[in-house]
Image: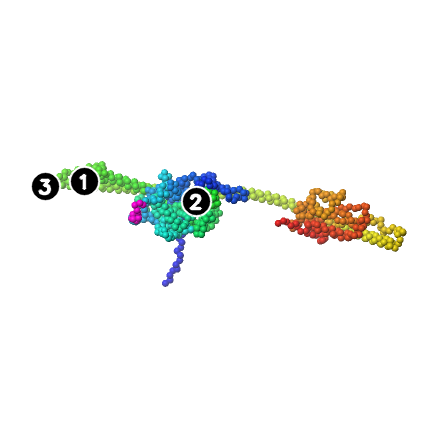
Amino acid sequence: MIRPLKGKTPRRPAPKKPSSNQKDPVGVYCRVRPLSNEDEESCIEVISNTTIQLHAPDGIKANRNGEFKETQYSFKKVFGIKTSQRELFDDVAKPLVEDLIHGKNGLLFTYGVTGSGKTYTMTGSAGQGGLLPRSLDMIFNSIGPYQAKRFVFKTDDKNGMEIQNQVDALLERQKRDSQQSLLKTPSSKLRTDPEFSEMINPGETCKAEGVDEDSSYSVFVSYIEIYNNYIYDLLEEGPIDPIKPKPPQSKILREDQNHNMYVAGCTEVEVKSTEEAFEVFWKGQKRRRIANTQLNRESSRSHSVFIVKLAQAPLDADGDNVLQDKNQIAVSQLCLVDLAGSERTSRTRAEGNRLREAGNINQSLMTLRTCIEVLRENQMCGTNKMVPYRDSKITHLFKNYFDGEGKVRMVVCVNPNAEDYEETMLVMRFAEMTQEVEVARPVDRPICAFAAGRRQRNQAFKEELTRRLEERGGPVNGETPFVMNQLLQSFPPLPPCEITDPSDDHTLPRLIEVLEKRHRIRQMMTEEYSKTANMLKSMLQEFDSNLMAKENFIHEQRGKLGEKDKMIQSQKTEIDRLEKKSKMLEYKIDILQKTTNIYEEDKRSLQHELENREQKLQRELSEKKRMEARMQGMVTDTKLKWEKECERRVQAKQLEMQNKLWVKDEKLKQLKAIVTESKTERPEKPQRPSREKDRVPIKRSASPSPVPTAPPVRPPHRRSNSAGGERWVDHKPASNLELDTVMQPNIPNAIKVSAPNEKALSKCDKYVLTHQEVASDGEIQTKLIKGEVFKTRGGGQAVQFTDIETLKQECPVAPSRKRRSSGNDPPQTEAMDGDWTDVETRCSVAVEMRAGSNLGPGYQHHGNQKRRKP
């Protein structure tokens, strides 16, 4: 035998919910509680009925400018310290109660820091009932006359509702009454808590409008607590051990067939009055306090959820009993949630288990914020991120409300005390973010297609029937009605019924005849009455069917009208969308047109600039060619010139050496004559070489200004050019001497430095070095070595030397000094090389040769750049 494989039960598809394209943002309200002490510092100021301003108290860090930042937050409505509980209920909870009676769900929760007035807002106090008792009072004031008898509606274990027949409901009522009679004590009262005895003043009661009178209602309440991410039933019956208390059994969340979340095994109590609902609520509060005391818990660190479930079903066609159809039951619920206090664990001063539990509570609140953030991001950015509802029990329980199963409203309670500034600021940011989340608007759910007004017509028919029966029937208060007297008078009169003689044979036959005649008349009247009643009944049924047909027709026309309205609304919405899209496209076209014009102008300007640059490039190329030809000629001329100059200097050097040799020979001869000959004879005057007459000019040419062996790149400029309008770097080493000469180098508009640096060179385009050295005749001569400054590829500055000017002074009275100094000085070429080497050593910038320069590799030197400070 082959057994089939067991597989998992396939998940049933979710029923199609009525879609609604309209969305409403989450209604967020703010309530400011008064300060506990007037001497306390306040950090909140109410600007208007929709805006508050948050001030940073003393001791809080300021912003970067050193000023305290003041932030404003907007809400749907702001309730100040003088707002009454009635005003808060009318604006926040009353619309949710009206939606509950009309078959729509609602979620209302209070959020804020511990001690900000959340519990007072939700529960209230004696004479100042909060949102919860006022909501219950409004519900029972609205549906009081239309409530079904107890146990007609019965909850199942799967978040559903059933309808029992009258017999089963009666049996359960009798069973409950018997149990209560056994448990009831003479001193027991319905309302045992004096704190809830006068919650609402009689003048503040209210009721909803438009209640369906053709339906029957029943209210069920449940009360749960979420502590440390566990769900506990506060209405569960169970023994409480005061000696060794045990924690209550936690509940789990399940999903019903409509994919709505509910607490499995949660106790749901049917209540029939506001007082009974208060009693159930107080019972849960009492069990919560006992559990917190025994288990050493804080009530402010848990979420409390009070659920009001309203079941309604239509009456049958006769308007007498509830329709026995489970599919016609409509169940709506209102959840009133008092969230745990939002505060940092450092302020709770908790340790050990308390600290861990406080962290779990903060984690659940953080999960709520994360869900709100993801919902806002999905709606604003068009993303489809998964909302982490399952990370916390509180978010998992109410995820259907955020998915469009009902309205969501939040009351943010704030304490203006400056000590709660940072926590209050976090609460404000969360509230501001929550307002940006939109929830789909719930649609109306029709209950049945029966004609409206069945209950009133049934009641009127019963009253009319009773009246007619009283008019035609038996006596009322011991008297015979007038109609009955008229009917009796229409019968034949009774003959005398007294029999005096036993042999009287006439009295009884006459009496029998009259009675038979009366009986025939009575039968005729009964038939006539039955015929008239049937005709009247048929007429009433015909009128009722016609009225029902007309009402169905009207309902159908209203449905069609509603569809037409929806179609018109959708078309208007589409037209508005298309108009906005058209305006947006026109705006984009204008922007693109302006951008195109700007690009066209840029294109024309760039083309014009390109043409100008091409022309400039052509001119530069032609100028470069002319400069190359010119420089080639100058190089050739300079080369010839320096060749002739070198030949002349060589000849002058040779002549100078010959003179030196002749002088030495003459000195030797004189010394020899002194040694050998007597002093009486005067020696003859020595003779110069044959070119003695040319000695002076040759000697003048033999000591030219030392210049580098390679010619400069550019021809020498006139002296006046050094004092032009360019910016100069005047480099004067600290070792130079001050000379009292008439002619002194004067360079205007120059930066004087003792050592060149990159900063000074970057600001100038000319460079001059004042160099002093001892000439061959022993005098000091000054050289002005000039050059041009330009930038290098490495980001530094380079100097190219272009010219040398020499300033020299001579002593006309001491010509022999020059000879003596010339005999001991090194050759002139070595001095020249040494001078250039000294110049290179003194300059800390780069000396590079340009294209076409005759400077050799020995004159190419790169100096180190100045090191910047870290």
Q: Is residue 235 left or right of residue 607?
A: left
Which is closer to the viewer, label 2 or label 3?
2
From which residue to which does the magenta span run?
177-188
**Residue 591 pos. (x, y %):** 54, 43
**Residue 179 pos. (x, y %):** 30, 49
Amino acid carrying label 1: it is Arg
Which is closer to the viewer, label 2 or label 1?
2
* Residue wearing tag 2: 115
Q: Residue at x 36, y 52 (%)?
A: 241
At mark 3, the secondary structure is: loop
Q: Which residue ends up furthest to the right in the rendered image?
A: 681
Query: Which of the two labelled residues, at mark 1 and mark 3, occupies the earlier sequence position?
Result: 3
Inter-mark Cα distance, 1 to 3: 26 Å
* Residue wearing tag 3: 503
Q: Residues within 10 Å of mark 2 (few under 14, many from 20)?
A: some
**Residue 246 pos. (x, y %):** 38, 53
Image mark for residue 57:
none
Inter-mark Cα distance, 2 to 1: 88 Å
187 falls in the magenta region: yes
**In the depicted structure, whether residue 253 falls above or below residue 536:** below
Amino acid carrying label 3: it is Ser
At mark 1, the secondary structure is: helix
Quadrant of the rendering where the N terminus is positioned? bottom left
In this view of the protein, which residue sits in the foreground, 215 or 141?
141
Amino acid carrying label 2: it is Gly
Query: Which of the two labelled residues, at mark 2 and mark 3, occupies the earlier sequence position?
Result: 2
Image mark for residue 518:
1
Query: Which of the two labelled residues, at mark 2 and mark 1, occupies the earlier sequence position?
Result: 2
Which is closer to the viewer, label 1 or label 3?
3
Q: Residues within 10 Å of mark 3 (few under 14, many from 20)?
A: few
In this view of the protein, which residue sits in the foreground, 188 or 464?
188
